Amino acid sequence: MTWFFVALVILMGITIAGIPAMSRPTVPLGIAVPSTHVDHPVVRTARRRHAVITLLATALVALATALVPLPIVAQSLSSLAILVIGFVVMVLARRPIVAAKSAEGWYDGVRVGVAASPVSRSTAGPMPGQRSFVISLVICGLIMVAAAVIGILAYPTLPDPVPMQFAADGTVNTYAAKSWWIVTVPLLALAVTVLLLTLLGIVIRRTARRQLPDGSGDLGRREAAERTGLQLALLGWSALVVAWSFAASSLLFWFGMAPRVVQLVVLATLVATVGLIAAIVVAAVRMRRRVADHATPGDTETPDDDAHWHLAGQVYVNRNDPAWMVPKRVGIGTTVNLGHPGGIAFLVGILAFSAAIVIVSFTLAL
Amino acid sequence: MDLVIEPLSQVPIYQQIRDRVIEMIAAGELLPGDALASVRNLSQALGINPATVVKAFDLLRSEGFVVTNRRIGTVIADVRVADPLDTDWTRRLHTLLAEARARGASPAQILAACREWTGDDHQ
């Protein structure tokens, strides 16, 4: 399993180092700057410093994980370590930008604005990414139905007790008494997860798109459309990986596969997850480049709302903003507005659902 | 064309929304029957208080530029009238022109600005 944690550290480190390439150019390291200053020497130096230090730290953590003999639990903390290091590096690297922006008055005399389409979206056609999202959900549905049918048909032949957890070498190390819960709970968890991802996709589809001009005449509109489309497509891909993971693990438990098969299935799941993360990074970087390449000149900048973004641009809190979901400042996607009751409720709901999954899993294994 | 508001402008935001919608009607980008975004969607997209959007829509409605349809919501009205340059509009134009003259604009400058705005598409 050591190789897995090393690969995870490297993947996370590269992703963290590549965050600026996935973000809008006007928010380098989570700080709002006018489009005229995206290539300012202070900004370029800060971005370079962030990338170099993050990659160096990634290499060190990966080497330490590979060479230092530690229990698996300790090795698993290496991914948490790279997250913390990445956060600290970003906080320190962005300080010169904050200082220069304040000292030189980068937003003095700058025309700032926010744009939106004034017409109702109900008359709009299909959105980019929507077809990919629907196709992914259909495939997820087929996977769920197939797994449910197999589980129901196979139940009479399931052993008692039923395998519940596998060790790293593919052998069973936890069992549970045979019951219909063994079949239904994993499938229910899969169905609820896919349902939540579907609802999230519908919410993203229907939520008003905030357009951020960033000094261009049409960049805000194009970026908002591409961003939403990419989110829908990625949600669909995520649902597919989740469906595969649940269905494959359920089959392993029900049919007591040989350890080698278990290891192969687990490997396939890990590869799919890593592939998903890599696909997200590549798609986000390509989207940013595509949007920037087609931008037309304009004179309106996105407002400087640094005051509402906390923890190095990761958390948005604005009680005066009626939107409970807003575009992320760092990276790609959407984040909740923790100043809005809806945003807080959504976050609490996600945490409660995750906790419920963990609790039910432990209860079944007892 | 999108509706752009400037949060730091001296002009109230509801006034900006009203002005932008009228400009879009004049430019042919909004046509009679086009449904405007809901108050909730527009306020969320612009990051402003829904009451501000309501105020803008109420102002547009009182001036006859939009009407409320129970099924669709707020839609652009057909505001063309037999006498578009009525007394009220002419009075407001006089005030606007007086404002420009008070700031030092010459009649030639004002006429040039009018020609630039109207152009061939607006004749």
Image (cartoon, rainbow, N blue to C red):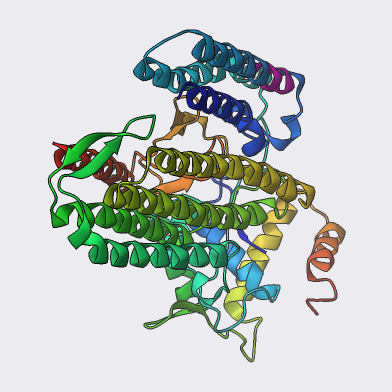
Q: Nearer the viewer, residue A193 or A62?
A: A62
Residue A151 x/y as whole percent: 27, 61
Asked where in the image residue B88 lies, by quadrant, the reply is bottom right
- Taking depth in this image into account, of A26 and A75 the one nearest to the observer is A75
Judge from the rendering whether residue A230 lies leftward or rightward of residue B43; answer left or right: right
Residue A110 belongs to magenta span: no
Q: Residue at x 31, y 64 (%)?
A: A150
Q: Is residue A132 above or below residue A81?
A: below
Q: Residue at x 67, y 16 (%)?
A: A52
Towards the viewer: A86 or A9: A9
Figure quadrant of the N terminus of chain B = bottom right
Residue A135 versus residue A234 in the image, above or below: below
Q: Nearer the viewer, residue A258 or A68?
A: A258
Give the total number of marks visible in the rendering: 0
Q: Is residue A45 magenta?
A: yes
Residue shown at the point (39%, 36%) measured from the top left: A317
Q: Residue at x 58, y 74 (%)?
A: A125
Residue B118: name its quadrant.
bottom right
Asked if residue A94 lies left or right of residue A290, the reply is left
- Secondary structure that dominates the magenta span: helix
- Give x and y (percent) for residue B46: 50, 53
Bounds of the magenta segment: A43-49
Residue B13 can be seen, yes or no: no
